[in-house]
Image: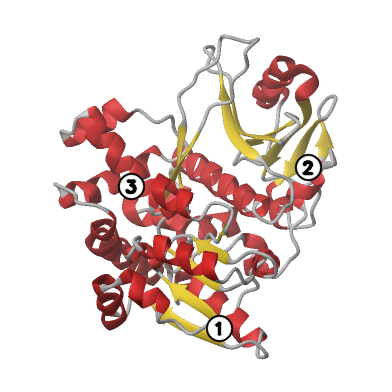
Amino acid sequence: MYPRYSELKVKEALSDTPVVFIMGPRQAGKTTLVRTLIDETVNEQWTYITLDDQAQLKIAQADPVGFVRGLPSNRIALDEVQRLPELFVSIKQAVDEQRTPGRFLLTGSANALLLPRLSDSLAGRMESVQLMPLSECEIKGRSPSFLSKLLNMEAPSTSDLRVRDHLLHRLVTGCFPEPLQRASERRSQAWYQQYLNNLIQRDIRDLTHIDHPDLMAKLLKLTAFYAGKLVNLSELGGKLGLGHQTIKKYMALLEQLFLLEQLPAWHSNEYKRLVKTPKLHSVDTGMTCALRGLNRERLHKQPGDFGLILESFVYNELRKQAAWTDDPLRFYHYRDKDKVEVDVIIENALGDCFAIEVKAAATLSARDFTGLKRFQSVAGAHFKIGVLLYDGDHTTAFGENLYAVPLGALWS
């Protein structure tokens, strides 16, 4: 079993918060983490219920208030609560009557907090912890250090050099626990195909009424071709024959199910020549490759696609490491009207900015730092450090607070 570095955050939340909500995509390991926590607290009495059990779901649907009131007074682990959002109000009532830390441990494969009445009902009573697919650090069993070094304005280094072959394999296999265990990339991609079919057929229908569920599947496949690119909702909608409001609603649903993310553009009141369009990233590159029919050999022969999907991989790795830090961090991309860009900008609560550019090649030139230097000049005193991740041999300075860093440093 892989270590999950979010486990500590869950334990800390259970020690002082009545409701803890672990949320993330299906099959990311939420139930495994919950069962691990239950096994580790043998001195506590737990009741575990999953709403994937149709019998339990029907009982809860018939009388949500009575269902929660009838639960034992010990700790309750309630799996897949997004299948019955009405339970949140009943849980609030139970917490108000008995405000015990760690009373409810919930999991959800959809971000129920995006629904205002649900998030408001448990305001001040619940802490959420996001659990995404495995990070490369977790897969390799290494303590994460890249992001912490970056935030301390240190240039990361690594002994993992020339990792292109490893990255080709990882991009295609992805980071969900199950496909990692499969014997071949073909079998891993078969898992993703079945996984996505089940999501479209079940989870999306649980969340809302969809007039054209077949178009949701087509939209999901279409978004895989936009990984690492600017989002154009009108273009997406036009290809599917959907209006702006409908495509916006469908994209929001895919985000709610943790299938993709829109990375907003960094902005500045002082600098007006900035593009404000968000970028699109899938939450897992294995999913992207499966939707596009890309295996390792095909990806190797298509360097443009490799670069864009690698950018999504790096973004996801940084987001996972950010979930383990105590600092609240915001993520952006940078692009101006001269089409100069930086792949990822991380901003802390003070407004300090840390920039990351991704290059799949092993060779570098001063031109590769054009985006980082432009952002450095635009951000001014807020700029702290810029890193160009590349498939090279060593960490090298390329100017004041600008460094080239091997990609292997992400998990070293």
Q: Which residue was labeled with disc 3? A: 253
Q: Nearer the viewer, residue 161 or 382?
A: 382
Three-letter code for the amino acid on which mark 2 is drawn = Leu
Say above or below: 350 vs 131.
Answer: above
Q: Say whether disc 2 or disc 1 marks the residue closer to the N-terminus.
A: 1
Residue 128 position by quadrant: bottom right
Q: Nearer the viewer, residue 350 or 92?
A: 92
For label 2, the crowd category at 10 Å Cα-Cα, with few meaning under 14, some 14 to 19 and many 20 or more, is some
Distance of label 2 from label 1 (alpha carbons): 43 Å
Please tell me which residue is depicted at 47% across the width and 83% down the height of the picture.
48
Q: Which residue was labeled with disc 2? A: 150
Say above or below: 222 vs 174.
Answer: above
Please tell me which residue is depicted at 83% across the width and 25% down the height of the picture.
399
Which quadrant holds the C terminus? bottom right
Three-letter code for the amino acid on which mark 1 is drawn = Asn
Residue 83, image x and y in percent?
Answer: 32, 65
Residue 33 position by quadrant: bottom right
Three-letter code for the amino acid on which mark 3 is drawn = Leu
Q: Which residue was labeled with disc 1? A: 74
Residue 295, image x and y in percent?
Answer: 40, 57
Please tell me which residue is depicted at 47% across the width and 30% down the height of the picture.
278
Q: Say whether disc 3 or disc 1 marks the residue closer to the N-terminus.
A: 1
Which structural element holds mark 1?
loop
Do labels 2 and 3 touch, CB within 8 Å? no
Q: Which of 394 and 65 is in front in this view?
A: 65
Please tell me which residue is depicted at 54% across the width and 12% down the height of the picture.
338
Q: Which of marks 3 and 1 is in front?
A: 1
Q: Nearer the viewer, mark 2 or mark 3?
A: 3
Q: Which mark is residue 369?
A: none
Q: Nearer the viewer, residue 314 or 278?
A: 278
For label 3, the crowd category at 10 Å Cα-Cα, with few meaning under 14, some 14 to 19 and many 20 or more, is some
